[in-house]
Image: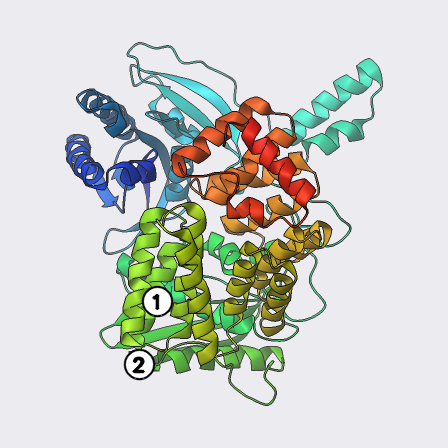
Amino acid sequence: MAEAGQRRKLSAILSADVVGYSKLMAHDESATVATLKEYRAAVGRVIERHAGRVVNAPGDNMLVEFPSAVEAVQAAIEIQRDIEGRNAELPEVRHMHFRIGVNLGDVIEEEDGTIYGDGVNIAARMEALADSGGICISSAIYDAVEGKLDFGFDFIGEQHVKNIERPISVYRVRSEPGAKSVRQARPIHKPVLVAVAALVIVGMAGIGVWQLTERSKPRPAVAVEGSGEQAQIKQDVALALPAGPSIAVLPFQNMSGDPDQEYFSDGITDDIITDLSKLQGMMVIARNSTFTYKGKAVDIRQVGRELGVRHVLEGGVRKFGDRVRITAQLVDATNGDHVWSERYDRPLKDVFALQDEITEKIVLALNVHLLRGDDARILRESTDNPEAYDYYLRGWNANMRFTREDFIYAEQMYEKALELDPEYALAMVQLGWLEREAAGSGWREFPDESRKKARDWANRALELDDSVGDAYSLLSMIELGDENHEQAVALARQAVDLIPSSPDALAMLSFPLSYSGKAEEGLKTMQKALRLNPFPPAWYYHGLGVAYLLMGKFDHSIEAYRECLSLAPEYVFCHINLTIAYMGAREKEQGIAQAKELLLINPSFTTDHVAIRRIKDPTVREQFKKFLRQAGIG
């Protein structure tokens, strides 16, 4: 049911983005921006001719709403043809290709015209499945346009897409006029298919039904071994509840009516998660996992089952003028009962005290003792300056995307935060992480200088507040890059001691463990992190891949790095190790192709890269260098 100021409706949604936009920007920013501006104007004219409405157009993305499925598909085809014609007039290095996804579905529309819901999410997933210059549509669109357009469609099967529970039937548009559709019967529901196939197999060869049944079960995105907690990322069954208190904080809704304020409500959510993670004995699900529910109407009991927690916190944030209103409610996920709820209306300058107050209420409701002795308030590594905090949130929101453009923007935001509050420890730590990432990704002319800056930022933060756990994680990774393995492990363990329920601290610990020759312990540590963060960011898969790589389990490592790059296509460290994993698995052709992709992103890459130097075992280090040379890297 839609809330006041919202309405539900059925819409045809088109989602589009530029393929390889970051590489185009890295090659020539000015030309790329000019081309994008010109192409957007042309796309806008096509959309207008087909009665469409641009809902949002951040960066190289575009979300468009149409009143008709036919109009949406016709517009998509015209857009691709127009772009193809314009590309022919440009040098090949400046060619800009779009991929487009189209879906027909139910959406929620806000008063300002913003739309949300699975109808939008599925359109985005269709886009991700499309080829460069191609168009993919959902079965809902196919049913609506079949026989009404002079174009064919190829059925490409049922696809499992991120954050959508059921598989989606997907079709590829064949844009040549008069092309015949490759028609296929709709897929039989999997259990029925399994049962029929099992009867046939048993009747013909007497093979056990259980074998087929086992193979038909949904598999996690990455295979994980071990007798400990399973690190399955995509859960199809309820996770076991932990013995102690556990909580998931759902993303607080942005109630301001301004999409540009999303970063603020997201930041409030993240800070509450961070504060709760400092509680001894409390299991807190990580932000990346809870944010998979953003913008969706959810059943709290289902959330509890999927994430394996007893309690769920949800709420909303409205920022208006110099005031902020936050509503919050704590729900028992085992039965749906409300444990506690509150509404706060305060001056914006009180936002930090307000977050602490909310966290205290949760702590009292769950009858949990604070980590820091008798202190009734969770100490924050924050700032008293609301404007500095605002810039920090903008930077943090950008640097989660692992692209060079977002790196530059995030750096600017953190620097502005420090101009307003020169003692803002968390902003210092984030600048340190950016410097470290830039050094390893080839984004700085002098990487050694960047690593020194990263260390300086971490040390400055700790001089201000020696309880900033993330600073110890940062120093750990710096020491690892300098091949000080024991020191790296000790610092990472110190971070975990400070924030024991933080999955990020645990995940960071897995890296020095694996690289120092303790890959099995590194894997188990990452499994614990994944239990707290079942839907993790890309770098978790990097850590998982490292553990498998150093255990010699190249096939598992390949799966991990494929998942990593699906989330962050320009993540240099993942490209490096995926190349090694392919060569180790004797998939030479894929390894050579991956090496070429790596050199496009970082042309200066050599086998002396920090990703190789940090391996403690000299035999393994030389073997991996050999793999890279065999793939074509000097």
- Label 2 element class: helix
Left/right placement of residue 564 relative to residue 144 reads right
Residue holding disc 1 = 392
Q: Residues within 10 Å of mark 2 (few under 14, many from 20)?
A: some
- Label 1 element class: helix
Mark 2 / mark 1, whichever is N-terminal = 2
Q: Quadrant for residue 294, please give it.
A: bottom left
Label 1 is placed on what type of residue? Answer: Tyr
Residue lying at 45% horizontally and 76% vertically, measured from the top left:
381
Residue holding disc 2 = 349
Judge by depth and name the residue closer to the eye, 16 or 406.
Answer: 406
Residue 164 visible somewhere in the drawing: no
Residue lying at 29% horizontally and 18% vertically, measured from the top left:
149
Label 2 is placed on what type of residue? Answer: Lys
How far across and how far down the image is residue 400, in percent?
A: 42, 54
Q: Residues within 10 Å of mark 1 (few under 14, many from 20)?
A: many
How far across and how far down the image is residue 536, in percent?
A: 53, 52
